[in-house]
Amino acid sequence: MASLSEALSGFGAVIVTGGSSGIGKSFIGAMGILRPDLEFFNLSRHAPDINDSKLNLRHFPCDLAQPLQVEEVAAQLEEILNRGQPAGKILLINNSGFGSYGPFPEPNLSHQLGMIDVNMRALVQLTGLLLPMLRARGGVIMNIASTAAFQPTPWMATYGATKAFVLHWSLALDEDLRGSGVRSLAVCPGPTATNFFKAAGLKQSLLPADSRETCEQVVMTSLRALAAGKSQVVSGWRNRILAAIGSRVPKPLAARIAAKVIARYRPQADSTHSAGSGQASSPQAEKP
C-alpha cells in the first residue's frame, strides 16, 4: 500500500464541507502536513479556526441546507479549478452533517427535514454538480457516513437513516464510476471524541474513554483507506465488530436492541437535543 503522502501525491485540490470543526477540520490539518502544497476549499457557515499561514486554505461561506447556496458555491469552485490551478486530481470530502436525539419528530419537523437536506440532498447535489470536473481531472469522492448506517437507530431515527443512505449511495456510486478515473469511498466513524455528546445533552460518561476515537484517528483511517483504494471503511476495531453484528441481525430485532441501548444516553426522559458537524442550525459537533 502506498504511504499517505504518496496516496495524496496526485491531488492538487481538496474540497471539504464542514471543515470548520471536528473531523472536517482535522482532515485539513492532517493533509496540510502531509502535502503542504495542497489547496483546500472549505464549504461551511463558519471559517475553520486554523492558525497556519503556510496552509493554502480558502473558505466559502455556505449553508448546505440551502440548495441555491450550494449551486452558487459549486459554480465558483468550477470557475477557479477549471482554470487549471491548482493542477492535479480533486478530493471531494462530503463531511457536513448533523443529528438530533429524541423521539421523532422532536425537536420539530423542520429540524428533521433540515437534517435530510444537509446529510443527503446537499451531498448528492454538490457531488453531481462537481462530478464533470472530477471526471475531467480524476479524483475521489469521500463521503462521511457513520456506524449508525448499519442498523435502525431509534431516538435518532432520521439521522441513522440518512447515514444508511450515505453508505449505500456511496457504494453504488463507486460502481457507477468504475473505469472513469473517479472513485467513491464511504467512511463510517463510530463515537468520536468531539463535543457531539455535550452538544446533544447526552451522557458521554456512558461511553468508556477508550471506546471513543479522536478526530485524528478517524482521519488517518480514512486516508489509509484512500491509499488502499477501498470503497468502504469503518474506523476503529470495536466499531468494525459492532457494524458487522448490526448488519447481520434481523432489522426488527436490531431496532429493538438499539432502542434499549441508545435510550441509556438520555439524561432526562423529557429532554430532546440536537448536534451537528459544522452545518445547519444545531451546535457544531461531529456525528456518532
Image (cartoon, rainbow, N blue to C red):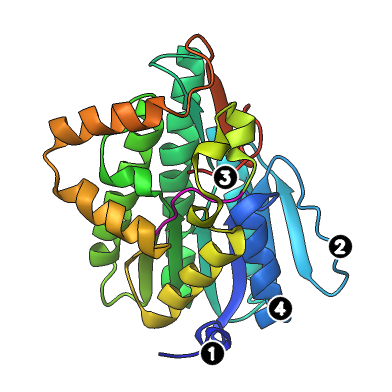
Distance in Å between CA atoms under marks 3 and 1: 28 Å
Distance in Å between CA atoms under marks 1 and 4: 13 Å
* Mark 3, secondary structure of its residue: loop
* Mark 2, secondary structure of its residue: loop
Mark 4 sits on what residue? 33
Give me the residue at 41% from left, 46% from top.
Answer: 124
Q: Nearer the viewer, mark 4 or mark 3?
A: 3
**Which three-letter amino acid code belongs to the residue tagged 4?**
Ile
Mark 2 sits on what residue? 51
Q: Is residue 220 left or right of residue 50?
A: left
The earlier-in-sequence mark between 4 and 2 is 4
**Which three-letter amino acid code belongs to the residue tagged 1?**
Glu
Residue 44 lies in the magenta stretch: no
Mark 3 sits on what residue? 286
Q: Is disc 4 surrounded by few (<14), some (14 to 19) or many (20+) residues within 10 Å?
A: few
Mark 1 sits on what residue? 6
Residue 192 lies in the magenta stretch: yes
